[in-house]
Image (cartoon, helix red, strand yellow):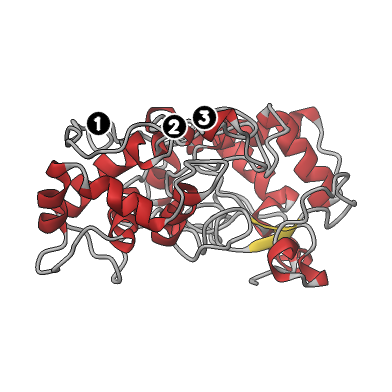
Amino acid sequence: MKLLAPLMLLIALCGCSVESGGTKAFSPQPANLNSRKNPPSEDKIALGRMLYYDARLSRSQAVSCNTCHPLTRYGVDGTAVSIGHRGLKGNRNAPTVYNAAGHIAQFWDGRAPDVEEQAKGPLTNPVEMALANADSAVAMLKSIPGYMDLFRAAFPGERDPISFDNIAKAIGVFERGLTTPTRWDRYLNGDANALTPAEKAGFQTFAKAGCPSCHMGPLLGGNIYQKLGIANPWPEESDMGVFMISSKEADKLVFKVPSLLNIAETGPYFHNGKVAKLEDAVRKMGHYQLGKELTEDEVRGITTWLRSLTGEIPHEYIRKPELPPNGPTTPVPDLS
């Protein structure tokens, strides 16, 4: 795990300002989040868009990727934990899919290395989309006549293109296009007027407080793991994070650091979704991670800057497509 020594970075970054090189720990978002292992094509993206919206990839045929990650709402459903098959609730907050392909790994505990692998998880999770197994997903799509030609176009030359791996690749390549350029990116690219004076001052407060010890880089997070409760013990230990996968003592309460892009639109906050207001999330991070009781002016300044990280939703890219109709053998919804 890429755990940071936060004190060292805090010392390095404290006192930095926007004008004096305080943005050195940051960079604009990359031009794309493509993967060499899963190169994009127009046909593959179009297929992935359809699969993202197709609720027939769930047992009840009522839950799609877009159910828990609605793209018109910055990729979150606004609930502490999402509701899936038969009204069952998950145990962690569903993070946004926007810009997620740029993270070092997926899920709060990093158990999937990329968005392609992540796309497989919800399909067979009994609390989410609840398909019996990977074969059920393949059988469903093969029963819908229109999908065969779409898969052939997206994966040319393959003898049997409708496979579980290709379902995940198509969804993943679509998600790699879910980026949201921000005014902060414009500022980092040299547009001095992209931020207001209040937003620039808010960034200085953010940097001086030591927040970039975890939230740095082009996505302002998503690139390291960190323990909750570095400075003061985190008060809740019902979810031990990476430890639940690794069983290593050092991984207790360790989670992937979330990106701050679109943070003003993607609450509620933290892995359990128990903090509704951005200001309260900032206060908690000050106390538990930095050992600081931030003043109201500091909280106001930081959140003013954080709101400048709200990007542009690519409305044309996410437009809901027309889905191929059922075939004569397409299974009916299973509510069991």
Q: Which residue is mark 1?
A: 319
187 sits left or right of 153 in the view? right
Q: Amino acid at mark 2?
A: Thr
Q: Position of residue 318 (x, y in %)?
A: 28, 35
Cα–Cα gap, marks 2 and 3: 7 Å
Assess whether mark 3 and mark 2 are in contact (beta carbons under 8 angstroms).
yes
Left or right placement of residue 335 versus residue 142 in this view: right
| Among the 4 quarters of the image, the one containing residue 138 | bottom left
**Cα distance in 3D space between marks 2 and 1:** 15 Å
Q: Which residue is mark 2?
A: 67
- Which residue sits at x=80%, y=62%? 252
**Residue type of the residue flagged with mark 3:** Asp
User: Residue at image x 44%, y 44%?
Assistant: 97
Rendered location of residue 147, percent (x, y) = 17, 46
Q: Is residue 48 visible?
A: no
Which secondary structure lies at badge 1? loop
- Comparing 212 with 95, the one in front is 95
Residue shown at 20% from the left, 34% from the top: 326
Could you tell which of marks 1 and 3 lies nearer the N-terminus?
Answer: 3
Q: Quadrant of the N terminus?
A: bottom right
Q: Nearer the viewer, residue 205 or 287?
A: 287
- Percent of width and height locating residue 190: 37, 49
* Residue 148 left/right relative to 73: left
Mark 3 highlights which residue? Answer: 77
